[in-house]
């Protein structure tokens, strides 16, 4: 039986009859989304009905919410999480919240990434892509300083950085052999010797392994004055702009297009690029295998079959069964079939609710797990309910209605100790350690749930105008058992409140079913969310 986080971690000695107790039964139709259905029985399945405080504790534990404050005066802030309730499933979603120092000023970069086939590539992308974007922007400004205020110039740099980043994933490996044609000059034994270089540190092996997996990418860039927003999208993550349009009315604008088999335009694009290849799209999947039509990585869909057969097949630990790969490689005649060209959307924030500047504006970035949770009720309904809830939490003493910190203050940080992962979990990478940093010496803030940065104090830096804190940092729990005393009060994290609404809102039974269902495999899709105030 799945029990609450306090019971799981504390290992409290409840009576046997209580340990075996279940509070209710859930049916397939009770679980939001499309991840599980009637065929995933037997139904009904048991779940534990959680009380309100335990729901918030469980949400804090499972989603590991974080908050980053870019500018307290303006209320510019980003709240984020990565959620997967199944204890046997490791999430393949990632997010990033980062500041880029360009020409001496700080730009904010946020993003969500939805990995597939494995988490190697999504881990690499979430850590390294923001660095490359920053380098391209700085180089662009250095070369053409007169275009610093040209939004189209920023869009061009943004797009070029992403394409170049993806080209390097396969290019770095092909350079070892003189290109794709150069593979003919190497035997399989020679290729294995080059790429399986563990005895020399494994650099080539790590480069080659990135080509086996893929990830979607949704990245938002905001200039230092918050006058302009750019969104780059590859795949089926979604960006939503939430802005006031009157008293208690909100405009919900989708800024992205899904690049998957549900988009007929994407299917037509691939068919147009590959005429006389009826199997380039089968059952609304690329080559009958891949759901997203634009993504990073996934080299077998972008390079000739020789890349997979000569390089990836020779990569340790090897392929016990090549038949699934051969099934789609046999259809690979004129690659690439997957596009690396991002869809760039620019929004002039000066023109978003210009007459309602005293009300907050929000940017929501989410992986398709959130979209899946919204299938039954609808995304706009859930977001509208959420934003009314957020602005309705304003404390009695107000400073500014447009400042989110006056409406929903960040959880206070604990200056005595950092926030440690509550317990080992397969639901995702551990939360990074947060520790105090000197405001005078800290670099621009950089936060992600990538394990590449999870243990680095650089990822939790505080600057004079930016701080970062886990939502549960207000807990005074013992380090020997930190999760046993996670706070049970309603969260001030905007992303966690949005997740709570999508899981069932104030319906404790519905939320409890989502959090504690007794099922051996994942019953909900991985969900990463970043909510940023504008």
Image: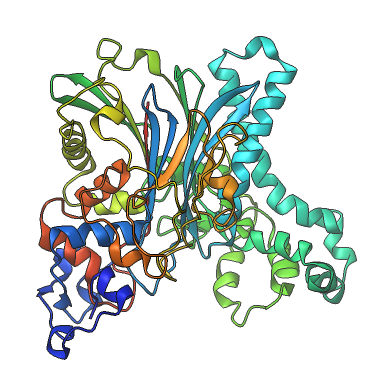
Residue 456 pos. (x, y %):
59, 52
Residue 97 shows in the view? yes
**Could you tell whether 347 is left or right of 62 in the image?**
right
Q: Is residue 370 above or below residue 508?
A: above
Farthest residue, direction front:
416
Residue 160 pos. (x, y %):
64, 32
Farthest residue, direction bottom:
16
Quadrant into which the N terminus falls: bottom left
Q: Nearer the viewer, residue 248 or 147?
A: 248
Which of the 4 image quarters holds residue 254?
top left
Residue 476 pos. (x, y %):
33, 56
Farthest residue, direction right:
185
Which of the 4 image quarters holds residue 174?
bottom right
Q: Nearer the viewer, residue 502 or 399?
A: 399
Residue 366 shows in the view? no
Q: Is residue 168 above or below residue 249?
A: below
């Amino acid at each position: 039986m799945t029990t609450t986080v306090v019971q799981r971690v504390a290992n409290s000695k409840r009576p046997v009859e209580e340990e075996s107790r279940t509070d209710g039964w859930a049916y397939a139709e009770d679980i939001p989304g499309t991840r599980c259905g009637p065929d995933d029985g037997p139904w009904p399945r048991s779940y534990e009905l959680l009380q309100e405080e335990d729901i918030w504790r469980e949400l804090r534990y499972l989603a590991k919410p974080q908050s980053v404050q870019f500018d307290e005066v303006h209320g510019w802030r980003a709240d984020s999480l990565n959620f997967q309730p199944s204890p046997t499933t490791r999430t393949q979603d990632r997010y990033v919240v980062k500041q880029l120092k360009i020409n001496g000023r700080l730009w904010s970069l946020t993003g969500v990434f939805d990995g597939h086939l494995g988490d190697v590539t999504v881990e690499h992308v979430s850590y390294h892509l923001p660095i490359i974007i920053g380098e391209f922007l700085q180089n662009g400004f250095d070369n053409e300083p007169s275009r610093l205020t040209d939004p189209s110039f920023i869009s061009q740099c943004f797009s070029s950085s992403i394409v170049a980043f993806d080209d390097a994933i396969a290019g770095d490996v092909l350079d070892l052999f003189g290109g794709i044609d150069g593979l003919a000059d190497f035997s399989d034994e020679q290729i294995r010797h080059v790429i399986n270089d563990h005895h020399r540190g494994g650099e080539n092996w790590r480069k080659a392994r990135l080509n086996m997996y893929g990830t979607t990418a949704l990245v938002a860039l905001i200039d230092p004055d918050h006058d302009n927003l750019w969104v780059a999208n590859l795949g089926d993550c979604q960006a939503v702009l939430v802005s006031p349009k009157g008293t208690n009315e909100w405009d919900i604008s989708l800024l992205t297009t899904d690049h998957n088999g549900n988009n007929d335009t994407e299917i037509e694009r691939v068919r147009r690029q590959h005429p006389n290849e009826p199997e380039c799209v089968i059952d609304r999947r690329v080559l009958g295998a891949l759901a997203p039509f634009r993504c990073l990585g996934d080299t077998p869909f972008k390079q000739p079959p020789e890349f997979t057969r000569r390089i990836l097949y020779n990569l340790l630990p090897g392929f016990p069964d090549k038949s699934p790969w051969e099934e789609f490689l046999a259809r690979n005649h004129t690659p690439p079939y997957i596009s690396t060209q991002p869809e760039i959307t620019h929004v002039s924030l000066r023109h978003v609710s210009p007459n309602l500047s005293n009300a907050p504006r929000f940017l929501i970035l989410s992986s398709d797990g959130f979209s899946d949770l919204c299938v039954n009720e609808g995304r706009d309904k859930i977001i509208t309910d959420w934003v009314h809830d957020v602005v309705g939490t304003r404390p009695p003493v107000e400073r500014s209605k447009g400042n989110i910190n006056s409406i929903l203050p960040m959880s206070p940080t604990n200056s005595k100790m950092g926030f440690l992962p509550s317990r080992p979990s397969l639901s995702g990478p551990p939360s990074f350690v947060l520790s105090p940093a000197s405001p005078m010496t800290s670099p621009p803030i950089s936060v992600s749930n990538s394990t590449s940065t999870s243990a680095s104090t650089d990822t939790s830096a505080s600057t004079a105008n930016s701080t970062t804190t886990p939502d549960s940092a207000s807990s005074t729990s013992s380090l020997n058992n930190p999760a046993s005393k996670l706070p049970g009060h309603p969260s001030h994290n905007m992303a966690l409140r949005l997740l709570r609404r999508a899981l069932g809102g104030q319906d404790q039974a519905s939320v409890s079913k989502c959090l504690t269902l007794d099922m051996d495999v994942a019953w909900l899709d991985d969900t990463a969310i970043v909510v940023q105030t504008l």
